[in-house]
Image: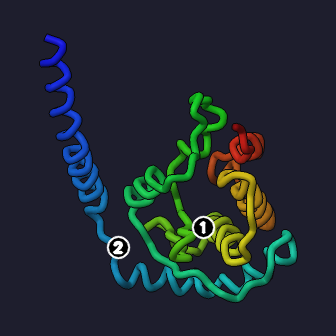
Amino acid sequence: MFKQFLAIAAVAASILPTGYEAHCRDLEASFSARPISLAQESDARRRAADLLDEIVAWLSQNFDLPAIKEHPAIELASNMRLAMMRATDGVPSQNPAGNNLLNGLSQRQVVALYDNKSKTILLSEDWTGTSPADQSVLVHEMVHHLQNVAGLKFECPRAREKMAYLAQAKWLERFDLSLEHEFDVDMFTVVISSACIY
């Protein structure tokens, strides 16, 4: 009887990944039913590119980051693609103990990502760059780009988030806005979730 159970478990385990991957592809297809138009992506890329020099200068003046002129590539991505990339990026963004306080940022909707390897900022398909909140997302990701290009080292991958959130919060303050009001992110959670806990 136990051998039959093991055989069934082995067969189920070999089938599950394929079914799960197919399910993810189906989910991604259903969530991206509203394709990003070329004009929309072109406008967003242009707005982002127009902001990059200003953001880099501002970051170098207000934070300990170099004024590197090497700009990242900019892409728009569906919210599902961003969420799937975050889930599979290999960065330990969750506390193994499952502490909700530490998991707070990783459970929020992903609005943008930075890919270190391709030096690409992926912005949500909803990003227009016309509001201070949208611009602050670009500020956050530019911190990661400058950290990457400058070769800055951190105790753990999560530690690089603290400066990015601080910069995003300070950018929003210029417009009398807050990280908590615009994105439901409080600084206590940022500090705790960016700590390297082993």
Vertical comparison of 161 with 143: above or below: above
Image coordinates of residue 144 in percent, x first then y, are: 66, 67
Q: How is the image coloured?
A: rainbow
Image coordinates of residue 24 in percent, x first then y, are: 28, 50
Vertical comparison of 56 with 177: above or below: below
Crowd class of label 2 (few under 14; some 14 to 19; many from 20; radius 10 Å)? some
Circle 1: residue type: Asp
Circle 2: residue type: Ile
* Nearest the eye: 61 or 47: 61
Specify the label residue 36 is tagged with: 2
Query: Which residue is drawn at the image coordinates 25% and 55% (left, top)?
Result: 25
Identify residue for label 1.
Answer: 134
Vertical comparison of 197 with 172: above or below: above
With 63 as the anchor, is 96 left or right in this view? left
Q: Quadrant of residue 193?
A: top right
Query: Which residue is drawn at the image coordinates 29% and 65% (left, top)?
Result: 34
Query: Which residue is drawn at the image coordinates 43% and 68% (left, top)?
Result: 125
Which comes sooner in the sequence, label 2 or label 1? 2
